[in-house]
Amino acid sequence: MIARRTFLKVVAGAAAANACSAAAAGPADVGDVTAGAAADLHAGTLTALAGEPVCIGRDAQGVYAMTLICTHAGCDIGQQGSVSSQGLDCGCHGSRFDAVGNVVRGPASAPLAHFAVSADASGLLTVHTGGEVDPSTRLVVA
C-alpha cells in the first residue's frame, strides 16, 4: 500500500502531463496559417497566432515563424505560457526560449522548430507548418 501523499503526487503528475500533451496539436497538423499583413508586423516583435501553436516574429533580417510546442514535454506555450519580444516561457515546466527559439533555461534541451513564411501580392503573410526550415531563414519584406 502506498502512502496517501505519494499517491496524490503521482496522480497530480499524471494529470499535468496529460493536460500538456492532450492540449498540444502539432504544427504539422495545422497546415498553412494566415498571419496577417507584413506591414503590421514591426521589427522586434514576436506574436502568437490566435488559436494556433505557431508564432511569427520580425527582426532586422526579416520575418520568421516558429512552433509554440515546447520541445521538453509538448506543451503549447501559447496556451500554457507566454510569448513576447523578450522570448517564450513554457508554463508547464518552466522552460524558457529566446525570441528566436533557442533554449535559455531548461528542462527543454532542443530549440523550437522554424517554418517557412511567404507573402502574397498584397502583403498578407502565410506560415507553412508542413516542414521545418533552418532557423536563419527569413522572408525579407519592405
Image (tube, helix red, strand yellow):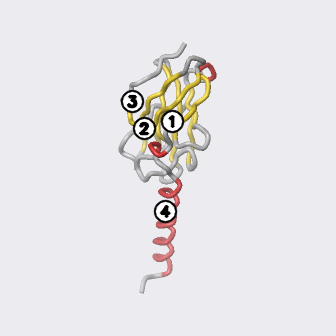
**Mark 1 or 4, nearer chain start:** 4
Q: Give the structural element (helix, strand or loop) at label 3.
A: loop
Task: Tell me the mark number nearer the camera, choosing from 4 and 2.
Answer: 2
Task: Tell me the mark number nearer the camera, choosing from 1 and 3.
Answer: 1
The answer to whether 56 appears left or right of 115 in the picture is right
**Mark 2 or 1, nearer chain start:** 1
Q: Which residue is mark 2?
A: 130
Q: Residue at x 55, y 31 (%)?
A: 46
Relative to the observer, which residue lies in front, 138 or 28?
Answer: 28
Q: Give the structural element (helix, strand or loop) at label 4.
A: helix
**Mark 1 or 3, nearer chain start:** 1
* Distance between the alpha carbons at the discs numbered 2 and 1: 7 Å
The type of residue carrying mark 1 is Asp
Please give the label number shown on residue 135. Answer: 3
The answer to whether 134 appears left or right of 121 in the picture is left
Q: Residue furthest top?
A: 142
* Distance between the alpha carbons at the discs numbered 4 and 3: 30 Å
Across and down, in percent, residue 61 comes to 46, 18
* Residue 137 in which image quadrant: top left
Q: Which residue is mark 1?
A: 32
